[in-house]
Image: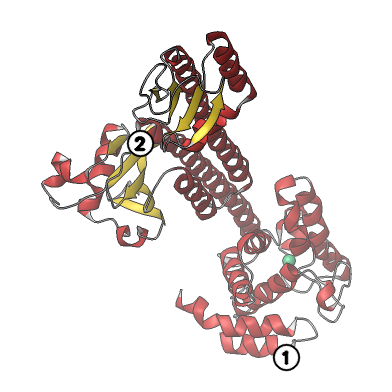
Amino acid sequence: MKKTNSFFKKIISRRNTAKILSDMAARLNIRILVTDAGDNIIADIGQDGEFEKSGNSGNSMVSYPINAGGDDQIGFIKGSEGCALVASVIDCIAEIESDKRDLTSELLSKYREINLFYDFAENINIRTDFNEMAKLTSMQISELLNADSILIILKNENTGLLEVVFAFGEGAEKYTPLKPEDAVIPERVILSGRAEIVNDLSADVELAGILPKKTGSVLCTPLRIQNRVTGAIYLINENPIAYTSENLKLLMVFSSQIAAFIENGRLLQNLQETFISTVYTLAETIEMRDSYTGDHTRRVMNYSLAIGRNLGISGDELETLKLSSILHDIGKIGISDSVLLKPGKLKDDEFEIIKSHTILGEKILKNIKQLNHIIPGVKYHHERYDGKGYPEGLGGEDINLMARIIAVADSFDAMTTDRPYRKGLSCDAAFSELKKCSSTQFDPAIVDAFIEAFPDIKEK
Ligand SMILES: [Fe+2]
């Protein structure tokens, strides 16, 4: 760190230094003049007239430079010959103070790094979205390390090509997609599993063969997921700068955080997929007992999701709609075959038993904590907009939105599906039926959303 005049002035003005100077001046019986590098007097200590400033005779003034262990002079101790000892003591004090200052500044910088890491670790734990995590991480990296672009790169397991899954920084756009010449260093890092610093790209033997005029400095660290290197963090500075091994270590810490996040996300996705497929199998088992010709569950789910998207539902809410629609009839598990599969008209008491599948569904789902949130959609999918449905006779928007959507999707599929005892309606005839029952059986807004979204469903 550069030492300045103000730094020297500060040392000389300290009470301890001032005392040392005045004690030495008294003991040696000399006058001491302290100046900064620009020859401005900082202190004038001791007896008057002890030396002649002109230096012509007697105790002429001698000047001793102070450089505090560095190359630059930060001041002078001036006086008679006896001042050599004073100068040596002051030089020692200045050097100690200078080391202290460097150490303090290094400590402050480490403290800042630790603080940033702490914030980073705390924030990353409460975030589940990859892009949000990647943005936060890149912001932290760019605050600590100079970077024009930060890229998170993953190797596509099927094609073997490197893909930029996240790019940060003003110059990052040109690296998406990653050109073969820009992939040279990340490829090398992924292959070897070793992080790299290249402070002058034009001197990189491999890269120079492809892009001889490419300049700049880069840091690249491997992303290890499940003990395999599956990607890299690539930090690019378009102008050559001197990255250090400390900088590389810092980037490696971020890499391990990102890798852990990606791995957790992958595990969570696997878990969710297994969960959905288990739920799906369960729904299909129920469907097999019923008199539908098959694929009812999938169609009700597709219709429900199309309505949901048309109404602007997304994210977790759409996921709830998906599960609710798949499991809307789960309560039928508890209805005996003699009632559930009875051909022809049901007696009143038998119809009451069928109606109980809504309450039975609630009972089953109450025992599965992960599915508690879909209970309203399942329990109320036979409520009517005019309040004449079951199990509670709720009306209008008092009926859960998921349930109102499933009611339309389920009824449409029931109307358009062939049964052993009757042929299914055409889509247009079923639309007319839905419209006819708008505001009585169904929420009119949902009927409209379904009819509007239907062409998209058919195209799929
Ligand atoms: Fe039902």
Residue sitting at 80 percent across and 55 percent down?
A: 362
Is residue 320 found left or right of 59 in the rendered image? right
The span from disc 2 to disc 1 (Cα, nearest Å) is 60 Å
The image quadrant of residue 231 is: top left
Q: In terms of depth relative to the viewer, which is nearer, 13 or 280?
A: 13
Query: Where does ligand 1 appear, by image quarter?
Result: bottom right
Instruction: Determine if residue 79 is in view.
Output: yes
The colour scheme is secondary structure
Label 1 Cα neighbours within 10 Å, binned few <14 / some 14-19 / many ≥20: few
Query: Would you name the residue on which mark 2 appears?
Result: 229
Mark 1: which amino acid?
A: Lys
Question: How far across and how far down the image is residue 16, in percent?
Answer: 62, 20
Q: In terms of depth relative to the viewer, which is nearer, 329 or 264?
A: 264
Q: In terms of depth relative to the viewer, which is nearer, 454 or 100?
A: 100
From this viewpoint, which residue is outermost toward the left?
Answer: 209
**For disc 2, does the CB lie below 8 Å from ligand 1?**
no
Callout 2 secondary element: strand
**For disc 1, does the CB lie below 8 Å from ligand 1?**
no
Is residue 30 found left or right of 335 in the rendered image? left
Mark 2: which amino acid?
A: Val
Query: Would you name the residue on which mark 1 appears?
Result: 436
Q: Name above or below for residue 82 compared with residue 453.
A: above
Which numbered tag is attached to residue 76? none
The image quadrant of residue 351 is: bottom right
Is residue 19 found left or right of 72 in the rendered image? right
